[in-house]
Image: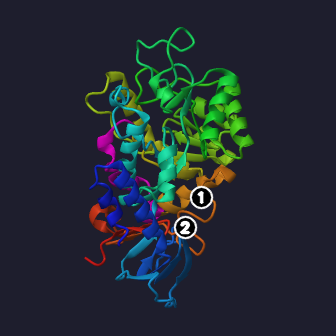
Amino acid sequence: MDETLCSTMTKLSPLKSILTAVLFLCAILAKAQTTILITNVQVFNGKDEKTILGNVLIVDNIITKVSTQPIPTNKSGNTKIIDGKGKFLMPGLIDNHVHLALNTMSQADLLKPEITSEKLDEYTRIEGEKMLLRGFTTIRDLGGPVFTVKREFDKGLFPGPRIYPSGAMISQTSGHGDARLPNEKSKRWGGEVSKAELMGVGFIADGVPEVLTATRENLRSGASQIKVHAGGGAATAYDPLDVTQYTPDELKAAVDAAEDWGTYVTVHAYTPRAVKRSLNAGVKCIEHGQLLDPETMKLIADKGAFLSIQALDEAPPTAPENVKQKKHTVIEGTDNAFKWAKEYNVKLIWGTDYLFEPKNGPKQSTDILKLQTWLSNYQILKLLTYENAQVFKLSGLRNPYLEAKLGEISEGAYADVILLDGNPLKDISVLSKPDTSILLLIKDGIIYKNLLNK
């Protein structure tokens, strides 16, 4: 039985008991394939601009050999040999700013009574499979309830990417993550705990004790890093873009609690004031940063922090006017942010950051093309693979995938690879058409797509 049938079979049965049995059988059959030899491929290892024509051996879920010479292997029933036909083999793609659960529906839909945690998990599984089939084998989820689905993906019960989860986004009252409706009172002043907090979308935490509790609650649930909102947002209606959020002591509390668990804090921040305060508190990664100045960009480099940047789109026509203006301001700053990051050798990583806009899911692939404004094709490929994987090292022992390397094709790396019908070093648009361009998709040593025999 081919592993690629698992996803299709799960959609055929309306009964949960049958579905569970099918998933369990699929996982067993997939794991039974212990050796895969991919021959005759152009190998881009994630780091070097030049490819090699060679062969790649996968044993269980690890790449054990990469060679320009033939690789001897036992041609038993447990060995699958795939002729790559000279196509382009590269590491699976990495998206470093994802909200997997929260982009399955609009914010208004999420607040409907019929949307329970179980229902949200169902939508998240579906979106996870779509993301995997777009070639994204690893994501860093920066806010939302994904712990349950992550465990299911890791066990092979459902097809989906590896997930580095943050858990609930941590925000001050009136901050970027305060998702209450206008008529909802604070839980401290006679109101109820918001549905967003109850479902693990975000925590509203004020003062050092509450920030410590929120951080520790996420770590208890299995967070690999902590996400804090340190400044105003572009897509939210109630917090101005220019405001700085959380005091130095509050930010330091989150950093201390994360470091006690051997991991780090990343913050949502656009402005120099918010970023400087965060860096001085010990924050190791900045999300966004499109409104920075050269001085602050140099400070990021001097601190050795990462800048996780996105090339965003204008707000939709239906958005409030203040949101449209804020989004436009961020987009106008993107060009300078990229240029200064390159000038000061900032450790750059990339993500898409779709939130409450389900129709944007397929744009995960086409957004890659925006990077051509600032980067060469080689630089883009390296960013989407090897360089994006470097931030994972900050998670220390909270890294859920410590067994091997990610973002590269090398001996001792995880077997997360995609085979493309085209060479993205020459034409990066190959990555924007995953349905037709991805001929072979392997994640954790399991084949999820194989079109080579068709």
Q: In the displayed structure, does residue 116 sit left or right of residue 303?
A: left
Report if the CB atoms under discs 1 and 2 are less than 8 Å apart: yes
Residue 30 is situated, as x and y percent measured from the top left of the image, at 44, 69
Q: In the displayed structure, does residue 250 sit left or right of residue 45?
A: right
Quadrant assignment for the C terminus: bottom left
- The residue depicted at 46 percent of the width and 82 percent of the height is 79
Q: According to the image, label 1 marks what residue?
A: 401
Instruction: Classify 23 as above or below 316.
Output: below
Q: According to the image, label 2 marks what residue?
A: 414
Quadrant assignment for the N terminus: bottom left
- Please name the amino acid that badge 1 sits on: Tyr
Q: Secondary structure at mark 1?
A: loop
Q: Secondary structure at mark 2?
A: loop
Q: In the displayed structure, does residue 336 sit left or right of residue 244?
A: left
Q: Which mark is residue 15?
A: none
Q: Nearer the viewer, residue 19 or 316?
A: 19
Mark 1 and mark 2: span between their CA atoms? Answer: 9 Å
Q: Nearer the viewer, residue 422 or 304?
A: 422
- Closer to the chain start, of discs 1 and 2, is 1
Where does the magenta region start and end? Answer: 355-381
